[in-house]
Amino acid sequence: MTALLQPPSATKTPPVPSPSSRKRRSFRALEPTGWGVAVRWVWLSLAGILSFFPFYAMVVLSLKPGKVVELPGSLLPWTDISFDAYEQVLAGQNILGWLGNTLIYSLVSVVAVLFLSALAGYAFAKKRFRGKEVMFWSFLAMVMVPFHVTLIPTFILMANLGGVDTYWGLILPSLANAQAVFLMRQFIQGLPDELFEAARIDGAGEFRIFLRIVLPLCKPILATLGIFVFLWHWNDFLWPLIIAKSNSMFTLTVGISSLQQQNVPLSTMLAGSVVALLPIFLAYLIAQRYVQEGVAGTGIKG
């Protein structure tokens, strides 16, 4: 009887969990146990060791010129170390000239590809014109066409224009990058339209809006694309091999490959590969933070 006589306010109702608490519980349920964490770290450590081992072997064997490769003794870094292979590469080969050609090819291509893809991405994302979607998806369909299919027509076109064994003939065919345009469009689409409307009200032109608003806001994705484009051009082999006829126009990949025809020792070739790897490694270290921000931002906004 006493329970029936209590007022309704006295009865206790169970608390309703908030959405944030339910989300925390669901994430906590997905967290691995102690054994799961240990297994994950073991697998990640093995994957890291397997990924790092070729670079380790390349550096160690390049420091042991004139030695017979014996495993695992040749992979010990503290025995019979010599820098003769690096001296031979830097003094006896045209590797500095190849390095300069590769830097010109990569850096000029990066600047041109980023500028053109940002312009095209801004137009496809924020401008309205007839046939925009058809043009965009037609241009994006270039990703489906392998580069090897267009290799011979591109070379014939460059040869007729006089671009064989020249810098502009090396750089020009790689400037139309459909993947870069797509990523720039996806990133710029997430920018608020109010910024552009306010700039137009203040009297800013389209090119000024692009330089003062679009490019500064696109720094993370520009850094990400810059690293990817730089790596692709730095490691490119087929097109520089076809378009370059003289030794002075070789890039690093083509030049190091040509050492095999000269019966150069293995340590010398590996030393050249280490020299070619250092600029890529330094470029990634410098832009690592921007790469991570660009990938995360593109994944959220895309």
Image (tube, helix red, strand yellow):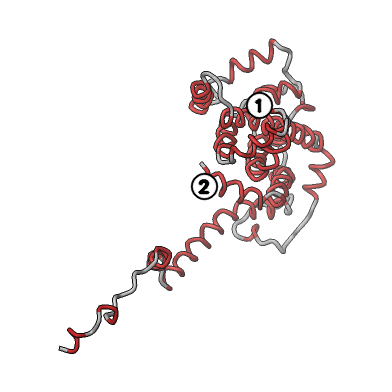
Q: Is residue 218 above or below residue 56?
A: above
Residue lying at the far top in this picture: please name it.
160
Position of 176 with respect to 12 (left or right) is right
Residue 124 position in % (x across, y down) = 57, 28
Along the line of sight, which residue is nearer the eye, 110 or 20?
20
Q: Is residue 118 above or below residue 158?
A: below
Q: Amino acid at mark 1?
A: Leu
Which residue is found at the position 17% from the left and 84% from the top? 4
Which residue is found at the position 68% from the left and 33% from the top? 201
**Callout count:** 2
Q: Amino acid at mark 2?
A: Ile
Q: Few, some or many C-alpha atoms within 10 Å of disc 2 (few <14, some 14-19, many ≥20)?
A: few
Tell me where residue 127 sits by quadrant. Answer: top right
Residue bearing the label numbered 1: 175
Along the line of sight, which residue is nearer the eye, 206 or 96?
206
Q: Is residue 259 above or below residue 223?
A: above
Asked if residue 240 can be seen in this view, the reply is: yes
Tell me where residue 48 sits by quadrant. Answer: bottom right
Tell me where residue 210 sits by quadrant. Answer: top right
Q: Is residue 245 above or below residue 210?
A: above
Which residue is found at the position 51% from the left and 19% from the top? 131
Along the line of sight, which residue is nearer the eye, 116 or 123?
123
Sequence order check: which comes first, mark 2 or mark 1? 1
Residue bearing the label numbered 2: 300
At mark 1, the secondary structure is loop
Asked if residue 258 can be seen in this view, the reply is: no
